[in-house]
Image: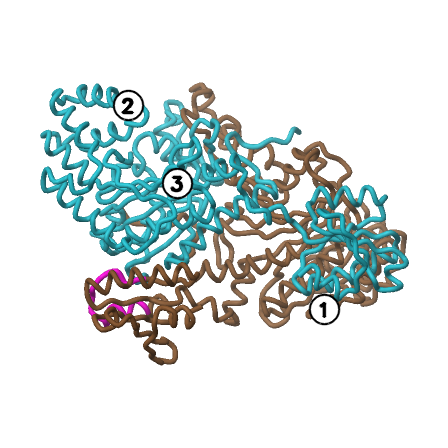
Chain colours: A brown, B cyan
Amino acid sequence: MKAGLAKGTRDFLPEQVRKRNYIFSTIREVFSLFGYQALETPAMEQLDTLMGKYGEEGDKLLFKILNSGDYLKDCSSEELQTASSQNLLKKISEKGLRYDLTVPFARVVAMNQHLISFPFKRFQIQPVWRADRPQRGRYREFYQCDADVVGSNSLVYEAELMQIYDMVFAQLGLPVKILINHRAILEGLAVQVQAQDQFIQITAILDKLDKIGQDGVRNVLYNLGLNPDQCSWILNQIEKKKIEDYQFNDHAIRATEELQKVFHFLKSYSFKNELVFDPSLARGLSYYTGCIFEVVPTQAKMGSLGGGGRYDNLTGVFGLKGVSGVGISFGADRIYDVLEEANVWPDYLDNTVKAMILSLDELSLEEAMIVATHLRSNKIAVEIYPELSKMKKQFAHAEALGAEYVIIIGETERNEKMYNVKNQKTGNQERLTIDGLIKLLS
Amino acid sequence: MKAGLAKGTRDFLPEQVRKRNYIFSTIREVFSLFGYQALETPAMEQLDTLMGKYGEEGDKLLFKILNSGDYLKDCSSEELQTASSQNLLKKISEKGLRYDLTVPFARVVAMNQHLISFPFKRFQIQPVWRADRPQRGRYREFYQCDADVVGSNSLVYEAELMQIYDMVFAQLGLPVKILINHRAILEGLAVQVQAQDQFIQITAILDKLDKIGQDGVRNVLYNLGLNPDQCSWILNQIEKKKIEDYQFNDHAIRATEELQKVFHFLKSYSFKNELVFDPSLARGLSYYTGCIFEVVPTQAKMGSLGGGGRYDNLTGVFGLKGVSGVGISFGADRIYDVLEEANVWPDYLDNTVKAMILSLDELSLEEAMIVATHLRSNKIAVEIYPELSKMKKQFAHAEALGAEYVIIIGETERNEKMYNVKNQKTGNQERLTIDGLIKLLS
C-alpha cells in the first residue's frame, strides 16, 4: 500500500518540531510569567457542546466522529432510505473534534466553577481541527495558543495582555504593531447612524477595510441601507487617530475612558514594539464587547499574527452567567512561516546531540558505551554510532544529524583512555580524558 | 444546556497539567540525552493506513471520522435501505483517529526514507484514541510516550533503552524492576514441542502466567493440543533463571547470545533499578522478533508501566522492506496514578506564581503594574490582584493559587517605594525596595 497523509494534515519531522517548540515555549514562558496556568481539554467533545457555537458555516466545518460499534442499529431501513446527510447525522454521530479552544474553555469553567478561584487565568496550546478546503497556509489540523482570564472586568488584564504580545514578539525577534480598539466605538458609530441593529454587519464590513478599501466599504455600507452622508460620516470618524477625539456619544465615551485607562496602566512600561490605537480595527467575531486587539508584522507580508478581546458572556450558554473575560491568541503557523522566511531561528535549534561517538572496532564500541554513560550522567546528549561501518559513513551520519562534536575511539584511545574529539564546525581536534570531555561538552 | 465531557475523556486542570508535564518532560529529557528526536504526526490518518494493523478488535476500536459535507451523496437510496454499518463505512468515512504511535511512525519513515539518515532515533509523546469501554484507569483518549530506532540491528540500542528506563524511573523516584527476555526463546520452546505454527498462541498463553498461574497455563497449553509432557517441559524451562541455561536449540542459542551481549554492553553501567532476565515474559503483540522488555513497579500494586521490543519489519506494509527496529513505551497514565498514590511529586509543582501583588487603593494598583513589570522582566512570575477587594478576599485568592509570596502595596509603600512582602509558608514579613524584591524572589 502507498503511504499517505490525510488531506490537509502534516507530519512534523524533528527539525520542524524543534522550531515549533521554540515558538510554543517562548509563548508558554511569557504566559507563565503573567500567572496564566496551563489547561488541557480532550480532542473530542460532545457534538452538543460544539454545534451552534461557530455559526452555520462552523457547524459544517466541524469534524464529526462516527458512533462506535453498530452505528446504524437505531436506524430503520425506511429511515435510511430517505435519509439526508443532515437528518442522519443526529443518529450516527454524537462527538466532534475540537474546533477552537474557547468553547471547551467555557465548558471547563462552567463544569468546574466550584473548584476554581476567580479570576481564573488559563492558557491553552493545543491543536484544533476544521474541515476547511486545504490551501497554502491553511490546514485541517493546526495549533491555537490562547490566554484568557475570566471572572473580572478589571482593565489591568487588557494592559497585561498587551505586554504579553510585546514580550513574546520581542523575544522571537519579530517586529510587530499591536493594534487596539474598543467595540463600543463601533457600536457608537452604528447607534449614531440609527443602525444599532446592524452593528454586527457594520463591524464585519469595517473589518474588510484593508481588503476592499474606503470605496469598497462605502459601497457595502450603502447597500446595507445607510445614506451617503452616514457612510461618509462613519468613514471620516475612523480616520481620527486620537482616542480623545471619540466623544460623539455615550458608547464612544465609555470606550475612550476604558482605552485611556489601559494606556494609563501601561505608561511606565517601555514597549519594544508599538501599541497603536486603531479605530478601524473591527475583528470579525460577534462575541466581543470591550477592547479588541490585533497584531500585525511590520516587516513581513502576512496577515495578523494574533488577536483577541473582551467578551461578556462566554460561559452563559453552559449555565454560568455574568462572567466577563478577556483573552488573546497567537497564530503559531503564521509566526512559523514569518520566522522561516526571515530565517531568524536561534542557532541552538540546529543542535540535536552534542556529540556522536564513532568506533573503530568491537571493543571500542564497548568503550563507547562507557564514555556515553559518563557523558549522559553529566546531562550531555550523545549518540553512539552503533555499527562498525566505514569512517566515512559514520562521519556522514554525524553530519546529517547535526552533532556538534565527534568523538573517535580506536585501540590507542581505549588503551590510553584519551579520546579524540573533533569540533565539527571548526575542524579543531583534541585528545582528552573523560573528565576533559565532560568539561568541553558541558 | 448542561456542560459535559465526551464519555471516556478528561479535562486536565492546571495542577494536573503540571504533574503530567513533569512526567513527560522527565521522559523527554532522557530520550534527548540518548539522541532521540521528537516527531509529531497528525491526529487524523487515512483509514487505509490504520485498518488491518491492530487486528479485528482494533479495527472496531478505531474512531472513524465522517466525511465532511454531504457525506451520503454517493449512496443511492437502494444502497442505504440495505446498508449495514460495515458496508456503509467505506462510503461515508475515510479518516480515523490515531490508535497508537507505531503505525504512524512506520508511515512517516516510509514516506520520508530519502530525507532520513539511518539509524533514525525518534521519540513521540502524543495522545491516541480508542473506542474501548471506559473504566477505572482506561480512557478513550490517552498519551503514549514512545522511543524507537529504526535502520540498525545493533544491540547497542537494546542496552541504551534499558538505561533509559532505569534513568527515567530513578528520576521519578519510582522503584521498578526491568524485565528482559527474547522472542527466540519463546519460539525455541514452540519449535522444541513441534508447535512452531502455534508460536504466537503459545506466547499469548505464557503472557497470562501472572494472571492464571502455572495450572492455568498448563490447561490452556493442553487444550491447544500439547501433550502433558510438553506442557510440563515448557513450564519447567521458563523456571530457569540463568540466561546460559537456555541452550536447548538453535533458536534459544541465538537468543542467549543476544541477551548476553546486551548485558555485556551494560556491565559498566550501575543500575539504580534492577534489570532482570525473565524467560516467562512474553508480550502480547505479534510483531516482536528479538529482545522484549517490560517494566513493573516493585512497591506499588499496578500492572506494567512500560514495555517494548525489537521488530523486523514494521515499515514493510508501507513499502519499505528490511528495516529492523527496536523501541520502548512508557505508560504515562499509570505512572501518574502510582506517583499520585505514593504522593512523591516534587514540591516545586505546587508553585504556580512566585508572588501575588495586593493593592489597597486605585493608585496602588497602578504601582502594582510597575512593580510587576520590573519583576517579570527579571523572569519572576507574578500576578496582580486586579481589583480593590477586601484584603481577606485578596489573600484567599493568593492562597488558592499557591503564590509563594504576597506583596502588599498601600499609600505608605508607594510613597516610600518600600514594599511589604510576606512569605506565605513561614509568615515572615519584610519591607523591601524593588531591587530587594528582585533579589528575594529570583
Q: CA distance from mark 3 to mark 2?
A: 22 Å
The disc label shown at residue A271, or none: 1
* Residue B165: x %, y % from top left: 37, 47
- Subunit under mark 2: B
Report which residue position mark 3 lands on.
Answer: B176
Query: Of helix, strand and loop, which one carries label 1?
Result: loop
Q: Residue at x 47, y 51 (%)?
A: B26
Q: Amino acid at mark 3?
A: Val
Q: In this view of the protein, which residue sits in the foreground, B40 or B250?
A: B250
Q: CA distance from mark 1 to mark 2?
A: 70 Å
Question: Circles 1 and 2: CB distance less than 8 Å?
Answer: no
- Marks 3 and 2 belong to one chain: yes
- Horizontal and vertical percent for residue A116? 69, 38
Q: Nearer the viewer, mark 3 or mark 2?
A: 3
Q: Which segment is the magenta one?
A: A384-398
Q: Are marks 3 and 2 in contact (CB under 8 Å)?
A: no
Q: Chain of mark 3?
A: B
Tell which of A209 and B321 is nearer to you: B321
Q: SS at mark 2?
A: helix
- Tag 3 secondary structure: strand
Position of residue B311 in the picture relative to residue A239 (left or right): left
